[in-house]
Every structure is written in structure tokens, then in C-alpha cells.
Amino acid sequence: MVILNAMVVLSPSEGDRPIVVLSGQRVLWAFSFRLLTLLMFALQSELRSRLGWAVIWAIYGGLPDFQVRRLEGMGFRPFLRLEELAPDVALIQALKERWDPECHAFLFPWGHMVSTLEDMVRITGLRVDGQAVTGTTYTSYQEPVERLLGLAVRGEGSSLVQQTVLQASLGVASVRRQTGEGQAEYMDRMTEDARAVMAEEEGDAADRDLRRFLTLVIGKLILGTKGDPVGFRCLPLLEDLSSVGNYAWGAALLAHLFDSLGTSSRETGVAGFFPLLQVWAYYHLPSLGLGVAR
């Protein structure tokens, strides 16, 4: 039984209306609940900003038609047309805590369950068959980054580039929403900014634009990392744009997500594409009451 201490006081600003001031365990509970609410909101915002979904959507909308057709030929169009999903932080963290690293599956009271390649295709539309997304790790990425993207890495031995730098190279120098600006106006402004710097005809400049965009998509969505920097270890795979569609990007996304789930449960969130986990759980855990009837 919770013991509740309380006293009634009169507030000078409220006249004779009594105000109940709680103390003891109830105050501690209220404070803890408020702290948890703020933490969940912060994690939700952090997960959403980590993906940078709105920015990628806006840049995608600014691509010329011939670039959109190239992305469609590579198999990325269904993935890029996914609607943004608000992070369900509690669900993601609960799934992470049930991850069994030895079996690479979620451990539930009734047994193990795991997202499959079939789930990956149905949810994201990315290819799961084809060449493996693998390659050589270089001691320095400065040369390929300068040659293929026209950018500079963070350090001599780094494989990361600041997301803001990559976005700025695609025309979106600032992602801050202006005062009084609605979501539609915000997206339209970023799309127009991106469209203004994109090469309008095929050629070396257009190839560079597409590699920059693919680096952002792969580095923030498919093989996402925690924090602002975008990884470009896959950049050598983008040198020959005609072969990009031959790789199993969906399988790489799933493997990267599984690897992220294997980190300590004390670490909040995951580095991979968390919407896959949410949609998978909504479909396969009907007790949540959030799935869609098949």
C-alpha cells in the first residue's frame, strides 16, 4: 500500500480555493513519470533526426526525372516512397531487450521470432538477392571521396563525413524550420533548394549528384549510424552506377540492423533502420493492436 502524505494550503493568487500539495512517494512517482516522458520524447526526436527522413524526401523530390528513373532501375524507388513513421521508442527498446544474440532472434515467452528476408521485401521493397554488399576497408577514404563526391572526409583515416556537409552539397544547407512555416512549406522549400543545384542533364555532374544522394540514403537509412556523421564505406560500390542495382541492399539493411540489436541493452535505440522493426512487430504481434489485417 502506498502511503501518501498531503496537506491543504491556500494560494494567495487563487483566493480561498484549496490546493493539495502532495509529498512522499506520490511526488517521487510524479517526478519519475515526468522524467520518463521527457526521456521518451528526447529518444523519439533523436531517432527521427538520426534518420533524416524529411530531408531525404525533400532532396528526392528535387531530383530531375532522369535521376528518379535511374533510382527506379536500381530498385530504390519503393524504399524512397515509404511514408515517414513516428518512432515507437518503447516498442523498439522492448524488442532490443528481448534480442537473443546467440540465436539472432527475439526471445518471447512462446519461443523465438525474427524478421525474415521476406518481411524485408514486403516492408521496404529493397532487393535481398544479388551480390553481397561487401568490399575492402581502406586506411584513407580521402581520394575516393574527393574524386567521386567532391567532398572532404573528417580526418585522414576517417570513413565518415558530416551529414550537414553532404546535405549542403545537395542544396539543403539548412534544415531548420522557419518561424510560422508549416510542414508543407518546409518540405517545398527544401525541395526547391535541392532542385536549384541539381544537374539537369546527364553527365559527370549528374553522376556526382546521384552518388551524393545514394551515400546519404545508404549512410542514414540503410546502414545508418548513430549521430550526425554519414559513413561512406560503401562508396567504392557506387563508382560504377550501372551496377548499383545488382547488390542486395535489403539483405545488408537486415544484417546491419541485427548487428545493432546486439549492442548493450543499456544503449537506447538502434543504429539501423528502426521502422522495419516497428512494422514487423505491428504485423506479427497482433496483441499490440496496431497491425493491419492481411
Image: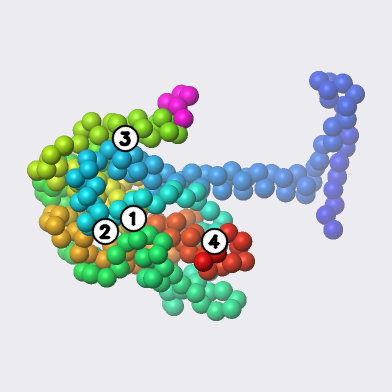
Q: Is residue 180 magenta?
A: yes
**Badge 3: few (under 14), some or many (20 or more) residues near its Cα, within 10 Å?**
many
The residue that disc 3 covers is: 191
Q: What mark, if any, has residue 75 been given in the picture?
A: 2
State which region is magenta.
Answer: 178-182
**Element on which disc 4 rests:** loop
Q: Residue at x 40, y 57 (%)?
A: 273
Q: CA distance from mark 1 to mark 3?
A: 19 Å
Point out the tag, 3 or 4, that comes first from the N-terminus. 3
Q: Is 200 on the left-hand or right-hand side of 111? A: left
Is 283 situated left or right of 28 in this image?
Answer: left
The residue located at (31%, 46%) in the rendering is 229
Counting residues from the start of the chain, the first of labels 4 and 2 encountered is: 2
Look at the numbered disc 3 and give the secondary structure of its residue. helix
**Residue at 39% across, 52% down:** 82
Q: Is residue 190 visible?
A: yes
Which amino acid is tagged 1? Pro
Q: Quadrant of residue 103?
A: bottom left
Residue where numbered disc 4 is placed: 292
Q: Nearer the viewer, mark 1 or mark 3?
A: 1
How far across and down, in percent of the image, does residue 166 sit? Answer: 25, 41
Pick the front one: 79 or 217? 79
Q: Earlier in the sequence, mark 1 or mark 3?
A: 1
Nearer mark to the viewer, of 3 and 4 = 4
Mark nearer the N terminus (1 vs 4)? 1
Give the residue number, with chain letter if any, for mark 1.
78
